Amino acid sequence: MGLSNLPAPSDGVLCIILVNTAQSISIFKGMLIFILQIIGIHLQSSTESVQASSGQCDLHITSDTLVEQLRKKIPSIPFSSLISGGNCDTGSELHDCTVCLNRFQPDSEVNHLSCGHFFHKDCLEKWLDYWNITCPLCRTPLLSDEGQSVEDDDDDDDDQETDSCLWYGN
């Protein structure tokens, strides 16, 4: 007979034992956590404990919440009021929205940001839907470091920490 081309049955036994042991431990851990949750004991995972110890905000927010925050801090105004108020130059390139590349109409609703740029209200809200919290053109944060809009002078100390967590994720 000669030597066999097939591996010996004992060659892969150690790997199989290690894999089966790891799977068994994982299944046992899952069952134990499930039983503890049924009893009412919640174990804190390692990622949750890191977040809690570093003081990170654990807010579950949606893009709709971001849009509502924007509406509250930076209200939309008609484009004609920007032109008549002297807040924008008369250059033709400034009459185009840099998000959608369409011309501003006098009755267009726009958001005038603290950095001086302005965009269609719907364009800026769509920008926020993708969790972008900066000016689409210059990347200036939509809110200042204190969690308040630069143009907003309200002194809501209760909202400052929430706003800061909401906008900056700290």
Image (cartoon, rainbow, N blue to C red):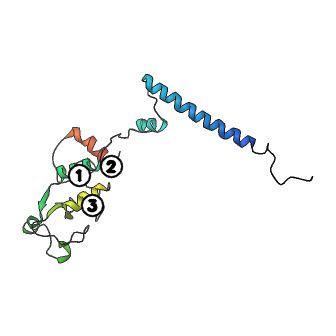
Q: Secondary structure at mark 2?
A: helix
User: Whole-percent x and y of residue 72?
Assistant: 17, 49
- The kind of residue on which mark 3 rests is Cys
Labels 2 and 3: the sequence-earlier one: 3
Front tag of 3 and 1? 1
What residue do we see at 43% from left, 35% from top? 53
Q: Which mark is residue 135?
A: 3
Q: Nearer the viewer, residue 89 or 59?
A: 59
Which residue is found at the position 15% from the left and 54% from the top?
Answer: 75
Most extreme residue toward the bottom is: 92
What is the secondary structure assignment of the residue under circle 1?
A: helix
What numbered label is drawn on residue 67?
1
Label 1 amino acid? Val
Above or below 65: residue 120: below
Q: Quadrant of residue 93?
A: bottom left
Determine whether the residue tagged by mark 3 lies in a helix, strand or loop: loop
User: Where is residue 38 drawn, in percent x and y?
Assistant: 44, 25
Q: Which residue is mark 2?
A: 168
Is residue 62 shown above or below 44?
A: below
Q: Residues within 10 Å of mark 3 (few under 14, many from 20)?
A: many
Q: Is residue 159 positioned above or below 80 on the image?
A: above
